[in-house]
Image (cartoon, rainbow, N blue to C red):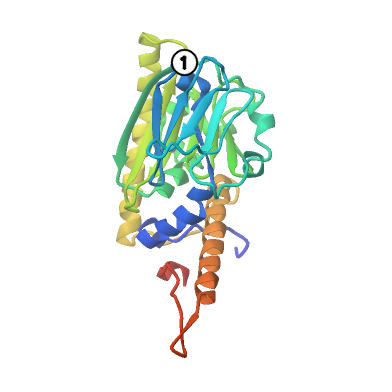
Amino acid sequence: MSDLTRTLPASWYCSSPLYQLERRAVFLKAWYLLGPITRFEEVGEKVGYEVAQVSLVACRMSEAPQDIKVYDESTGREFNSYLTETGLLFSTISDEAPSFDEFFPDLKPLIGTVDFTKLPHRRSIKYEGKFNWKTMVDGYQECLHCQYTHPSFSVFYPPTFYTVFNHKNFSQHVADPKKADDGLFLYFFPNCTLNVYGGGMSSFRVCPTEKPGVTRMEFDYYHMDSGEKFEEYFKFVRQVAMEDYELCEKAQENLEKGIYAEGILNPEKETGVAFYQQRVLGLVCAQHDAETASASSQAYEVNGNTRVVGPRLVDPALS
Ligand SMILES: [Fe+2]
């Protein structure tokens, strides 16, 4: 039993200082999927994003396929961005992120097999939910809940063959290995997804707000058709999204009330959850150690007495 991975403790879903530490340890050092190239079709149209309280804009500057600029609208400062050969645009939100290849060393072979330039962008929606960003990612990264929570989804994508493959900073979920062109779900650490199913494609971002118990969900939908067929697809995928939303609000209530503290993850069915939670845990602990060491080294002399600048984070979950 001691070899089994444990979940992050409930306090990590409810603490503001912990979120601020996550922001520095995880979010400022990551890459984000802004969307397939079809999201940025109009020259001059600004598509706005906000990730971990950093605002950015992506804008097609000319008809040239590669000419998309990602920048801070208030300062004009450009962020590092990367357009893959098959048409996915990724961006950083700070200079602290490593290079794209360092962050996703084995992503290209996988996304190189799928053409993301075909499906036009049809609709985008966003709204807030009363849950921590990790509460939603926990649910995305496993499908144990699918049969019970998503009865309509499970008819088309039965969890029987459901498999998760974890790579550096992303996971690939496969609903049925025999259907390579449908039922593909990609999770990009920490908070982006790309979902090809139901005849269309969606991408969503789980955007943390400054309140650890409130998250903004942002969805972009892509489909070949704009009329009735799209509406049919939209209804189907929205049903699944709302089922997850309700589940997350209920799970967050349990986390905040202390009903659930922590537990053991299923070593076969929850490897996706273990993978990303361990990544958060490792990065947050390393950041905490670095900041504590740096604060101690800032000890300085004042009138012959040693003064120490305290660490920025004080969270019982880490001490
Ligand atoms: Fe779900």
- Residue 250 placement (x, y as % from top left): 32, 47
Residue that appears at 54% across and 39% down: 188
* Residue 20 image-quadrant placement: bottom left
Identify the secondary structure beneath mark 1. loop
Residue count near mark 1 (Cα–Cα under 10 Å), binned few <14, some 14–19, many ≥20: many
- Residue 175 placement (x, y as % from top left): 56, 30
Farthest bottom residue?
304
- Residue 153 placement (x, y as % from top left): 44, 27
Q: Which is more toward the observer, 39 or 166?
A: 39
Left or right, residue 182 beside residue 314: right
Q: Amino acid at mark 1?
A: Pro
Give the answer, above or below, for where 265 lies relative to 304: above
Residue that appears at 37% across and 25% down: 124
- Would residue 15 be seen by someone viewing this image from the given angle? no
Residue that appears at 45% across and 71% down: 311
Give the answer, above or below, for where 97 lies relative to 239: below
Give the answer, above or below, for where 107 lies relative to 96: above
Give the answer, above or below, for where 212 lies relative to 73: below
* Residue 244 image-quadrant placement: top left
Disc 1 target residue:
120
- Would residue 187 be seen by someone viewing this image from the given angle? yes
- Residue 209 placement (x, y as % from top left): 34, 47
Q: Which is more toward the observer, 4 or 288?
A: 288
* Viewport quadrant of the N terminus: bottom right
